[in-house]
Image: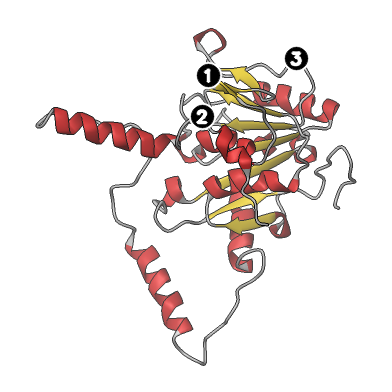
Amino acid sequence: MAKTNNNYDKLSAGYLFPEIAKRTKAFMERNPGVAVLRLGIGNTTEPLTPSVIDGLRLGVEKLADVKTYTGYGDEQGDSRLRKSIADFYARRGVSIEADEVFVSDGAKPDAANIQSIFGQDNVVAVQDPAYPVYVDSNVISGRTGKANGTTYEGMVYMPCNEENGFFPSVPKQKVDLIYLCSPNNPTGAVATKKQLKSFVDYAIRNRAVIIFDSAYCTYISDPELPRSIYEVDGAKECSIEINSFSKSAGFTGVRLGWSIVPKTLVTEDAQAGR
């Protein structure tokens, strides 16, 4: 007999952004003519650049000609794109190998899907407030208990508030997976190298893995602030970084991103490179 995943029943509410849209629509219906500034989901408003459109058109045309038709693409993403992403990091002083880059349909799906490679009994820590995907995907996977108001039993919340500059301290207890986002969604706070170093050191000591969401790094203008966690010594031993073209190239509706899994990354029950 087929059975459903009862962990879905733990979700305390619907997904945040559709809920915001529903409430916004109801407000506008009650208040016609009122201008509403939408600060919820980061959707795009401008069209893709001509160079991107030309590239997409060329790709489709190649698939329409038997001489250039390619069938299935490279398993982990187009090899040229993977190398270009590695070169992108190199220009920032970060050494990444092309085969450490895994191309995907965006940072948001990766933030949810990446945790499926980890055991169900891992203890998860998230910044509070956090991007909803980090929490909801782990609830669905069964890593938490029931909802208790706005939090879930078994999940470790790292407060981000005015007192700590909206960047948390490392957990006081041992955790296994740590979700960090810088620049942060939704607070906008950007972590310094010193702040990220504290988490890298913690992760190495506790054999934890940091899932670092750098999808908004394009917005960082201060050269002293890190755009990648790999700018911090030791991060390749304990961190997976996810990123996206949604913010840098307006690819919100195109869906293209990547994750970086260094060969030196070590989990508690495995060896580097395996």
Viewer-nearest residue: 230 or 159:
159
**Residue bearing mark 1:** 149
Residue displayed at 53% across by 14% down:
165
Viewer-nearest residue: 4 or 59:
4
The kind of residue tagged 3 is Lys
Position of the N terminus by quadrant: bottom right
Viewer-nearest residue: 16 or 250:
16
The kind of residue tagged 1 is Gly
- Asked whether the beta carbons under mark 3 and mark 1 sit within 8 Å of each other, the answer is no
Relative to 234, 217 lies left or right? left
Compared to residue 9, the image places residue 148 above or below, namely above
- Asked whether the beta carbons under mark 1 and mark 2 sit within 8 Å of each other, the answer is yes
Q: Is residue 93 visible?
A: no
Relative to 103, 187 lies left or right? left
Relative image position of residue 150 (x, y in whole percent): 52, 21
Specify how the rendered protein is coloured: secondary structure
Relative image position of residue 239 (x, y in whole percent): 72, 38
Query: What mark, if any, has residue 12 been given in the picture?
Result: 2
Few, some or many residues within 10 Å of mark 3 (<14, 14–19, 20+): few
